[in-house]
Amino acid sequence: LSAKVRYFVADFKDSDWFYIAEQEKYDIVIIHQALHELRHRAYAENFHTQVRDHLLGKNGVYIVTDHIVSDNGMKNNDLYMTVDEHLTALSLAGFTQINILKEKNALCSFKIF
């Protein structure tokens, strides 16, 4: 199994962060509690578009888990997004099948096709 898993580290605030892994397309791309590290929610759509265009294979699955703005969650509206804002950013990035996997303790996980 480990031969089929590739893990890489990139600074996705750099405009060409995805070139590190772009030698091939991936069946699954997972980001976990990292999207807010873009330091402003306005950058989320572009990030998702880069994942879609440069990393995700034809039938690939994209899993995103991040903190959310909510009554019991995060309060910084510039840094974090509501569930609806996550859904909108993913839709604007061109994803059409977006499912909420789980929302718990100010985190939300999305499964995107």
Image (cartoon, grey):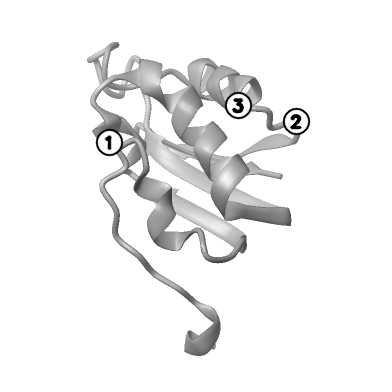
Give the residue drawn at x 32%, y 42%. Answer: 12
Residue 19 lies, in percent from the top left, at 42, 53
Q: Are marks 2 and 1 in contact (CB under 8 Å)?
A: no
Dot placed on the residue nearer the N-terminal end, 2 or 1: 1
- Of badges 2 and 3, the one in the foreground is 3
**Amino acid marked by disc 1:** Lys
Q: Is residue 82 above or below residue 67?
A: above
Residue type, label 3: Ala
**Residue behind mark 3:** 93
Residue occupying image coordinates x 29% and y 60% = 9
Spatial CA span between label 2 and label 1: 25 Å
Judged left or right of residue 21, residue 49 is right
Query: From this viewpoint, is residue 46 visible?
Result: yes
Distance (Cα) linking label 1 and label 3: 17 Å
Residue shown at 43% from the left, 26% from the top: 44
Which amino acid, mark 2?
A: Thr
Query: Relative to the observer, which residue lies in front, 59 or 97?
Result: 59
What is the quadrant of the N terminus in the image?
Answer: bottom right
Left or right, residue 100 beside residue 103:
right
The residue wearing badge 1 is 13
Q: Which residue is mark 2?
A: 96
Up the image or down, 113 lies above or below 9; here it is above
For numbered disc 1, what is the local secondary structure?
loop
The foreground one among 110 and 22 is 22
The quarter of the image holding the C terminus is top right
Which of 99/106 is in front?
99
Gap in angstroms between the C-alphas marked 2 and 3: 9 Å
Q: Please identify the quarter of the rendering in which residue 4 is found.
A: bottom right
State the residue at coordinates (52%, 65%).
23
- Asked whether residue 32 appears in the rendered view, the answer is no
Q: Which mark is residue 73?
A: none
